[in-house]
Amino acid sequence: MKDKKIIRVWHSGLGDACQLSTLPALFHSQGYEVWISDKTPCSDSIYELIFGLNPYVMGKTSENANCGEIPGFEYRDVCGSFIGSWEMVNGMSHVNDYPIVYYQPKEIEWMKDVVIIDTSCKTAKANYTIDILNEYLSVYKNNEKVYAVKFINYVSDGYDLGFPKTEIRDLFHYCDVIHSCKKFVCLNSGGHSLSSALKRNKNIDVDCLVTHAPAFESMYSRNNFFYPNINYIWL
């Protein structure tokens, strides 16, 4: 019987799941069975996108987690790469710099000339204000090819800046939208981590807006939730 690697994600967000998304393939390459702890608190849709479609994940288990984001495996910057550091603190070599998803996005033809703006941001929302976002995003006002996202199956925590909306049905549709648009403008949130993963397959133009709040300055100094394939705009 193969030894098991049982991954736990401690927090519930999309970005939290993305940060450990490269581990299953690496553990599998070392001969392990890979499972996800059923104590992982992410939603069913996040689980399905990040782990359910991952060909190296066997499924969920109630057994105790022994890797991932658990005590003894906390993130620390050991190689100058956020994803690479997670790989190394979990006992593997640094292989990846970006998250990974195995969903193949669909092209939405009408979005090829469109700018998509997503101001949703759960954990770090206190580091933004509507005024500072309006100041930067005003360049996009009155442009008929600019849309903000509207998630129809849950209440968004984003700022409403007055842009026309395009509806997002679910996380898979969200992937399609990010993949298809001309430019994706977002905050440092789950969509930002997802866009880094999607850029593996297509050179999507992504601007992630961050502020000089102490929380972001600290995160940047530790390469925590910052990816080298994303264009960061400091407001």
Image (spheres, helix red, strand yellow):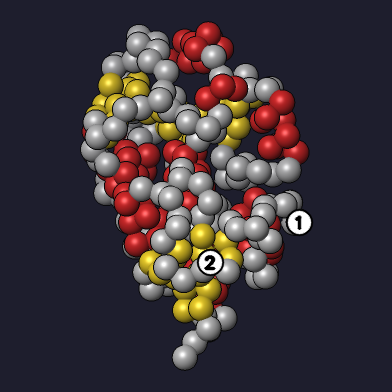
Residue 76 percent across, percent down from the top left: 72, 52
Q: Is residue 181 left or right of residue 31?
A: left
Q: Residue furthest bottom?
A: 1
What's the residue at 33%, 22% (across, down)?
Answer: 147
Q: Amino acid at mark 1?
A: Val
Tag nearer the camera, 2 or 1: 2
**SS category of the residue bearing label 1:** loop
CA–CA distance in space, label 2 to label 1: 22 Å
Check if mark 2's residue and mark 1's residue have beta carbons within 8 Å: no
Q: Which residue is mark 2?
A: 65
Visible residue check, residue 198? no
Residue 30 percent across, percent down from the top left: 57, 81
Q: Residues within 10 Å of mark 1 (few under 14, many from 20)?
A: some
Q: Is residue 224 left or right of residue 42?
A: right
Q: Amino acid at mark 2?
A: Ala
Q: Is residue 110 left or right of residue 195?
A: left
Q: Residues within 10 Å of mark 2 (few under 14, many from 20)?
A: many
What's the residue at 53%, 8% (across, down)?
Answer: 131
Q: Which residue is mark 1?
A: 78
Residue 12 percent across, percent down from the top left: 46, 45
Q: Quadrant of residue 164?
A: top left
Q: Is residue 134 above or below residue 34?
A: above
Q: Is residue 76 above or below residue 38?
A: above
Q: Is residue 5 above or below residue 145?
A: below
Residue 55 percent across, percent down from the top left: 38, 70
What's the residue at 48%, 31% (across, down)?
Answer: 122
Q: Quadrant of residue 213?
A: top right
What's the residue at 69%, 22% (across, down)?
Answer: 212
Q: Quadrant of the C terminus?
A: top right
Q: Quadrant of residue 228?
A: top right
For the image shown, how many numbered marks are present on the structure?
A: 2
| Chain-order first, disc 2 or disc 1 | 2
